[in-house]
Image: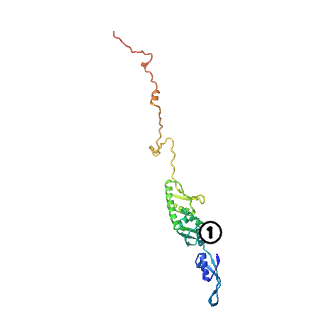
Amino acid sequence: MNKIFTAKTVEEAKRAACEEFGVSEDKITFEIIEEPKRGLFGKLKGEAKVNAVYEPSRAQIAADYIKGILSAMGISVEMQVSESEDGAVIELKGDEIGSVIGRRGDTLDSLQYLASMVCNKDEKNYYRITLDSCGYREKRKETLEELAVKIAKTVLRTGRDSVLEPMNPYERRIIHSAVATVEGVVSHSTGEEPYRRVVISAVNKPARPKKRTDGQKKFPNQKGKKGKPFPQKKRNVDFKTSFEKEYQKPVPKPKPEDSIKSELYGKIELDD
């Protein structure tokens, strides 16, 4: 971008350009178009005119964009930009930084995404922008790593898959890296953005216990000889009352002495 600045002197015009672009003088290319002329008795006539050309880096484009959004929100922050060849880290500091981070970093992630889109517009190679605030990224990373290891160990013990809540690509990479440190478990992502989740699974899942078949006891651990389960005996349950049992008793067969043909009394012998 370039702009023409006018002032009483060239130095004043350059300072105006630095204030306008928000950068130091060494980052601006100046072209002096016109200088004030000295008249009688050394007085200056006219004004200095300077053309200032400023080509901001992609990190600065992202920082200026974020500053504009926060200014519109009425939030005042200090920004520290650390540039590298393939990306930059923009650190935000201020009293109202909590509202910039948002719930679980949602607002911070959104600002980071928008700033990345702006600074990578019409560019072939991708320039990564990382937006941080008061060391939040590092604290969040430690929390996710502890969570991933804890869940991985639970999955390893129970053999049941665990599906985590939706996360952005940056946080999913942290989970995958942490799970890789636990032997016996693996992880993969499933679903579509922005609801893509991480699934943690055991490599060797324990076999499910077989269903109890007829003739086996309720407790399969109790076994008889040769490791075979005890056969289950069938029990006949009689629900008759004592009266019914007495009433339904079979009538006893008559004894020989009870026969109808027999005499009523036994033979009585009388002495003469």
Question: Circle 1 sits in a helix, a strand or a loop, which is it?
Answer: helix
Q: Nearer the viewer, residue 58 or 230?
A: 58
Locate the N terminus and report the quarter of the image it occupies: bottom right
> Which residue is painted at 61% across and 78% down in the image?
16
Which residue in the rendered view is the most extreme toward the left? 272
| Percent x, y of residue 89 | 55, 70
Q: Give the amino acid type for the residue marked by disc 1 in the picture.
A: Val
Above/below status of 175 relative to 3 = above
> Which residue is painted at 60% across and 81% down in the image?
12
Residue 65 occupies quadrant: bottom right
- According to the picture, the residue beneath numbered tag 1 turns out to be 118
Q: Nearer the viewer, residue 2 or 260?
A: 2
Locate the C terminus and report the quarter of the image it occupies: top left
Q: Nearer the viewer, residue 74 or 238?
A: 74
Which residue in the rendered view is the most extreme toward the bottom? 41
| Percent x, y of residue 83 | 56, 72
Q: Is residue 168 left or right of residue 33?
A: left
Residue 105 occupies quadrant: bottom right
